[in-house]
Image (tube, grey):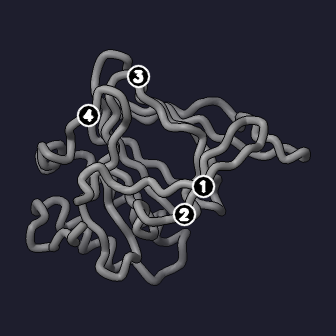
Amino acid sequence: MSDIKKSDLPPRLLGFVEGLENLIGQDEPHIVEQGSILLSDLVAHDDWLPQSASLPDPQYYRQYLLYRDPAARFSVVSFVWGPGQSTPIHDHTVWGLIGLLRGAEISQDYRRNTSGVLEKAGTPQRLETGVVTAVSPSLGDIHQVFNAYNDRVSIGIHVYGADIGAVDRSVFTTDGKIKPFRSGYANAT
């Protein structure tokens, strides 16, 4: 897939990308704190996401690449949920920010118990339009996510501290089995 040029980005997304570029290289807590503010401003406006990056699939959620830093220091994707769709339990291995542009997501965190088995950690978190949250190995990195709606599409804007489509990650079963995967992008050519 060829890289998306900054000059081709919608103005709101370009402003977000340039703001994030100014944070990269600082420590993770600062990137998460300040990046969350930038992402909150971006998802407060629903007038910039290209139609081509908001198309659901009838069977599977889709992840569309919106921008990848040329040095793969971060990536920005739209995560499009068809009605009732969900992810498997999975990790990220890098810091990430999730902001809801449309609809709502439900995220259930998981932690390993002393036997190494995954267990639900806390109650599910409902992320409504405009809400931003973070994930990372230091904050909690294993979760399962669902479209909160069975009758409509939801769209999140996800930002990760790497080219997330190319990162070696894992999906998990609750009995501790691990399967490696790379997510890729729905708009890969």
- Residue appearing at x 78%, y 36% in the figure: 175
- Mark 4 and mark 1 residues within 8 Å of each other at the beta carbon: no
Q: Is residue 37 left or right of residue 14?
A: right
- Mark 1 and mark 2 residues within 8 Å of each other at the beta carbon: yes
Query: Disc 2 marks which residue?
Result: 168
Q: Quadrant of residue 22?
A: bottom left
Alpha carbon separation for disc pair 4 and 1 = 25 Å
Q: Earlier in the sequence, mark 1 or mark 2?
A: 2
**Residue 9 at x, y percent in the picture:** 13, 64
Alpha carbon separation for disc pair 3 and 4 = 12 Å
Amino acid on which disc 4 is placed: Pro
Q: Is residue 152 left or right of residue 140?
A: left
Q: Residue furthest top?
A: 151
Alpha carbon separation for disc pair 2 and 4 = 24 Å
Query: Disc 3 marks which residue?
Result: 84
Of the residues tagged 1 and 3, which is closer to the observer?
1
Amino acid on which disc 1 is placed: Pro
Amino acid on which disc 2 is placed: Asp
Packing grade of label 4 (10 A; few <14, some 14-19, many >=20) is many
Alpha carbon separation for disc pair 1 and 2 = 7 Å
Where 85 falls versus 140 (above or below)?
A: above
Q: Earlier in the sequence, mark 4 or mark 1?
A: 4
Give the numbered dot on residue 56: 4
Packing grade of label 3 (10 A; few <14, some 14-19, many >=20) is some
Q: Secondary structure at mark 3?
A: loop
- Residue appearing at x 40%, y 58% in the figure: 36
